[in-house]
């Protein structure tokens, strides 16, 4: 636009020059056209992208900052700030000292400009700019804040009048509070208050307000961490001026003299390190307001710090806290160490280990195929020649369903899954969304041991469903987020039966008296994920210790030994409210099983001992890959299509390519449900 106007202005000048004498009207026309061109070029200079590319900020329920990103253009802390988010005292001091007639002029205080011009001329140099808040804003928008020339001052006058007339002085004030420079990569009063004082700008002492009033004048020269004497001088000057202008009285002036200067940057919300950019991708907003409780969040940060002090092997801690009374996510720890992972892990699908077992039991209860006192079988070779083992590699023989679930026994869980079918189990979990990620795989018995993936947030919601007697609720993180309608996942008595059984799960040694906690643990097959999920009163907490890159360290984390103590520690620190569950009259909650469900004896229905067998390798073998790095699995028997499962991947090809030396478990299954599994050691020939 300005280029075209300059062209028109040039034509007028050339046309006027062709005449020896110009009329007064022609002179005025030329001057008007020139002014229009200059004004248009000034307006065209304004770049509002500095506002659009500001930081993204996550806020807790009390308005504190719990997550942020740097600005997209200059990697600055630039948080949008409105007038009602800052201290009234600061606003009074700012207006009194930086733009006394802010509410009376239209962007430019011409008397102040004339006084500044007179002073500059008498001193022979630029000592005062006479800038208003609007003129300081346009310096940031136009990018010439470092060039103190009279031409730039003229540009700022035009631009300040324009933005005040177009957007209004209240918007101009917001832009100043957002864009003013405070040293380094800190912009805006909110970021400055958080970095210098460690708190939001809605409360400030007079000295704090004076420092933030003065800093934009010379951000690098007044920084109290680098130039404490200069900072003290300017603070006193602003306080003295504010007293003289009636912002406060002598009592405030005297009390402020004892205030100490901040000696170093406090940092912007240390909690922000635990919430990564992943949370921002669910919304296009720059300011995101959440239900996160800062007190709960602080508990999670303390746990993260404690975990990081003990472990520095590439494993990270992540946590989700749900409140069943409000259906809100009130705490979330994305990653305890952003140097290892900047992904918000609670939203990443991962193996739950055996943490899905309670839901298979609950669905079997609901289908009338199982009772908590039904006898199951924990013994070797129960399912043909497939030899899945328990975590402790021991077998318990005949056990009740209640004990099998509380002890997290693998073979009885497979037996229970056989009662309802792995396909039915997966479809039941996914009735209300793609909660359990099986991909293109055909669900098999390994699903109950962790071959399918689920996010920690969704796993927490499933456990909260048990806490709410079978009602599956959505949980909101963001204020105003639209939730799915509650849905019944399983019958109330089935959910209550599972919930009560999980109260008898073994307690960690550090929490022997937490008898009311209903919880379960899970450990992935290669020790890349250790989980513990449980409920106490209105809170459901899910804890995961994970190796984000799936490369484990020397120490092998387990759900019970490592994740459960963190779970109990967190639950013990949360303020809880009773759930007030009603009494339920059901045979599932009695101590005696119906005659028909005394014992599951018909295991031939899901087992054929001669159906499918892995001939090579055998359990305990040491195997070398072939020239192409592959290990082939030879088998006999089976009906129809046969699938091979390895580390969560399912294929019809009877080979896999190991990435590293170590022990591997491989399973195969045919279309009739026959299966077999072996564990062997792989040695790579380097």
Image (tube, helix red, strand yellow):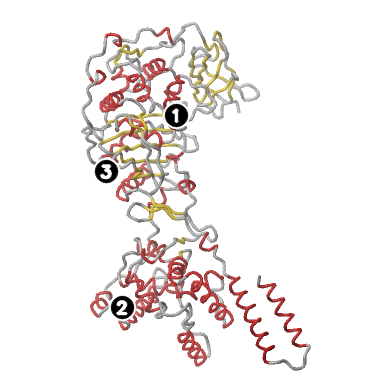
Q: Which residue is mark 3?
A: 574
Q: Which residue is depicted at the point 30% across and 38% down?
A: 324
Residue 673: % across, % down: 49, 13
Q: Are marks 2 and 1 in contact (CB under 8 Å)?
A: no
Label 2 – label 3 distance at C-alpha? 43 Å
| First in residue order: circle 1 vs circle 3 | 1
Looking at the rendered image, the disc whose residue lies closer to the viewer, 2 or 1, is 1
Q: Quadrant of the C terminus?
A: top right
Q: Are marks 1 and 3 in contact (CB under 8 Å)?
A: no
Q: Nearer the viewer, residue 515 or 388?
A: 515
Q: Which residue is depicted at the point 49% across and 82% down?
A: 129
Q: Nearer the viewer, residue 122 or 371?
A: 371
| First in residue order: circle 2 vs circle 3 | 2
Q: What secondary structure is found at the residue carrying circle 2?
A: loop
Q: State the image quarter where residue 195 is shown.
A: bottom left
Q: State the image quarter where residue 13 is shown.
A: bottom right
| First in residue order: circle 2 vs circle 1 | 2
**Other-residue count near label 1 (Cα within 10 Å), few / some / many at <14 / 14–19 / ≥20:** few
Locate residue 433 relative to residue 632 in the image: left or right.
left
Q: Which residue is mark 1?
A: 430
Report the disc number at residue 96: none
Residue 147: % across, % down: 56, 77
Q: Which residue is mark 2?
A: 247
Q: State the image quarter where residue 306 is shown.
A: top left
| In the image, residue 150 above or below residue 52 | below
Q: What secondary structure is found at the residue carrying circle 1?
A: helix
**Other-residue count near label 3 (Cα within 10 Å), few / some / many at <14 / 14–19 / ≥20:** some
Q: Nearer the viewer, residue 312 or 212?
A: 212
Q: What secondary structure is found at the residue carrying circle 3?
A: loop
Residue 578: % across, % down: 22, 38
């Amino acid at each position: 636009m300005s280029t075209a106007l300059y062209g028109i202005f040039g034509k007028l000048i050339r046309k006027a020059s062709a005449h020896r004498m110009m009329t007064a009207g022609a002179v005025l026309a030329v001057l008007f056209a020139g002014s229009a061109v200059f004004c248009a070029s000034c307006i065209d200079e304004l770049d509002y992208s500095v506002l659009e590319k500001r930081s993204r900020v996550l806020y807790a329920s009390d308005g504190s900052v719990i997550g942020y990103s740097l600005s997209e253009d200059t990697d600055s802390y630039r948080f949008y700030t409105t007038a009602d988010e800052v201290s009234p005292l600061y606003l009074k001091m700012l207006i009194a000292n930086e733009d006394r007639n802010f509410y009376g002029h239209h962007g430019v205080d011409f008397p102040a400009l004339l006084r500044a011009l007179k002073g500059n001329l008498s001193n022979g140099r630029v000592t005062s700019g006479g800038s208003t808040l609007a003129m300081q804003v346009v310096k940031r928008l136009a990018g010439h804040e470092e060039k103190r020339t009279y031409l730039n001052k003229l540009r700022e006058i035009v631009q300040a009048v324009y933005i005040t007339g177009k957007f209004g002085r209240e918007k101009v004030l917001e832009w100043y509070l957002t864009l003013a420079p405070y040293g380094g990569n800190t912009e805006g009063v909110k970021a400055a208050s958080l970095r210098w004082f460690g708190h939001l700008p809605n409360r400030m002492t007079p000295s704090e307000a004076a420092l933030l009033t003065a800093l934009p004048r010379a951000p690098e020269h007044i920084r109290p961490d680098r130039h404490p004497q200069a900072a003290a001088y300017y603070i006193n000057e602003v306080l003295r001026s504010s007293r003289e202008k009636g912002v406060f009285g002598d009592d405030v002036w005297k009390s402020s003299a004892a205030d100490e200067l901040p000696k170093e940057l406090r940092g912007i919300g240390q909690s922000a390190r635990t919430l990564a950019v992943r949370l921002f991708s669910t919304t296009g907003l720059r300011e995101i307001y959440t239900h996160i409780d800062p007190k709960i969040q602080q508990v999670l940060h303390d746990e993260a710090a404690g975990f990081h002090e003990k472990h520095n092997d590439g494993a990270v801690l992540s946590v989700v806290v749900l409140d069943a009374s409000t259906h809100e996510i009130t705490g979330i720890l994305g990653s305890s160490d952003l140097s290892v992972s900047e992904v918000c892990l609670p939203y990443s699908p991962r193996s739950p280990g055996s943490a899905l077992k309670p839901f298979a039991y609950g669905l079997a209860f609901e289908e009338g195929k199982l009772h908590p006192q039904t006898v199951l079988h924990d013994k070797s070779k129960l399912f043909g020649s497939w030899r899945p083992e328990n975590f402790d590699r021991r077998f318990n023989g005949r056990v009740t369903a209640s004990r099998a679930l509380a002890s997290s026994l693998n073979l009885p869980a497979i037996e229970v899954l056989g009662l309802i079918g792995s396909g039915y189990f997966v479809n039941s979990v996914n009735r209300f969304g793609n909660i359990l990620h099986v991909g293109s795989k055909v669900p098999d018995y390994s699903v109950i041991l962790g071959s399918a993936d689920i996010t920690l947030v969704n796993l927490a919601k499933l456990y909260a469903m048990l806490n709410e007697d079978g009602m599956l609720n959505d949980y909101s993180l963001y204020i105003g987020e639209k939730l799915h309608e509650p849905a019944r996942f399983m019958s109330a008595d089935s959910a209550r039966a599972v919930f009560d059984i999980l109260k008898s799960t073994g307690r960690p040694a550090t929490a022997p008296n937490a008898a009311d906690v209903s919880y379960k643990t899970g450990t992935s097959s290669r020790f890349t994920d250790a989980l513990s999920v449980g409920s106490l009163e209105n809170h459901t907490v899910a804890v995961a210790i994970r190796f984000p890159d799936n490369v484990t360290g020397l120490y092998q984390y387990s759900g019970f030994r490592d994740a459960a103590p963190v779970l109990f520690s967190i639950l013990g620190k949360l303020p809880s409210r009773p759930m007030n569950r009603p009494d339920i009259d059901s045979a599932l909650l009695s101590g005696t099983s119906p005659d028909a469900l005394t014992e599951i004896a018909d295991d031939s229905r899901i087992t054929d001992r001669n159906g499918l067998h892995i001939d090579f390798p055998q359990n305990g073998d040491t195997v070398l890959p072939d020239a192409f790095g592959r290990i082939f699995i030879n088998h006999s028997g089976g009906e129809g299509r046969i699938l091979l499962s390895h580390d969560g991947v399912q294929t019809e090809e009877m080979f896999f390519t190991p990435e590293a030396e170590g022990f591997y478990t491989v399973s195969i299954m045919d279309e009739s449900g026959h299966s077999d599994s072996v564990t062997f050691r792989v040695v790579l020939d380097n």
